Amino acid sequence: MHTQDYISQGTELSGAAFAQSQPAQATQTKEQKQACDDLDQFRTSISKLEQAGPQSTVGEIRTNADQAREDLKALAKASEKVAKPETENVRKSLERLRDDARNIPDGATVEQAQARIQADVKQVRMASAQLEKKLDCGMGGAGTDGMDATDPGLEPAPQPHQPTPDE
């Protein structure tokens, strides 16, 4: 066997090993795919709440909370049949967040507003991560926007074996 044959054979074997190490993704239903897409949009709205900066206003925070509520309506419609308890947890978490955002005094600073909703945003993130897991949205696909790799339930994707020059 020539060196090139060994390299070719090694590449085939490492490719096969990589394919076996990948988790098998169940085929998503139409409802699950739509729910994952809607979850992605919902998380984008939540990210806007987290990104409020010194130039933001309390009104913008309230508007972003309202937009998240609208996005949740679409998400709930798509996900309730396949993940009703998890969808309800997201809804309840968001309602607490929205109520707190609505009750921020008009004269509050952005820092005060963020401090008031910070725990609520974290709860919404955790509830949406549970929903994502139930929907089987998967890493790298719809529904992962804005998720931190340190969030519970998310693991780094396995890396393929890279042959060394000695192999």
Image (tube, rainbow, N blue to C red):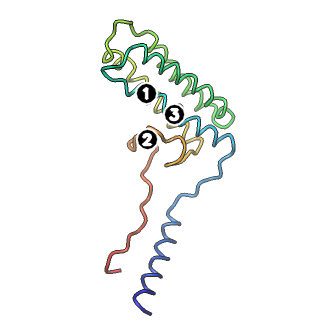
Residue 118: image location, x then y, percent = 38, 23
Observer-nearest of 158 and 74: 74
Residue that label 1 marks: 48
Observer-nearest of 143 and 95: 143
**How far apart in space, not on screen, are marks 1 and 2 (Cα)?**
21 Å
In the picture provided, is 138 more to the left or to the right than 53? right
Q: Is residue 108 above or below residue 75?
A: above
Q: Quadrant of residue 82?
A: top right
Q: Amino acid at mark 3?
A: Ser
Residue drawn 54% across and 33% down?
41
In the picture provided, is 106 more to the left or to the right than 79? left
Q: Which mark is residue 152?
A: 2
Quarter of the picture containing the N terminus is bottom left
Residue drawn 51% across and 33% down?
128
Residue 156: image location, x then y, percent = 42, 52
Residue drawn 63% across and 29% down?
74
Residue drawn 46% across and 11% down?
102
Q: Is residue 84 above or below residue 19?
A: above
Q: Quadrant of residue 58?
A: top left
Q: Residues within 10 Å of mark 2 (few under 14, many from 20)?
A: few
Residue 45: image location, x then y, percent = 49, 28
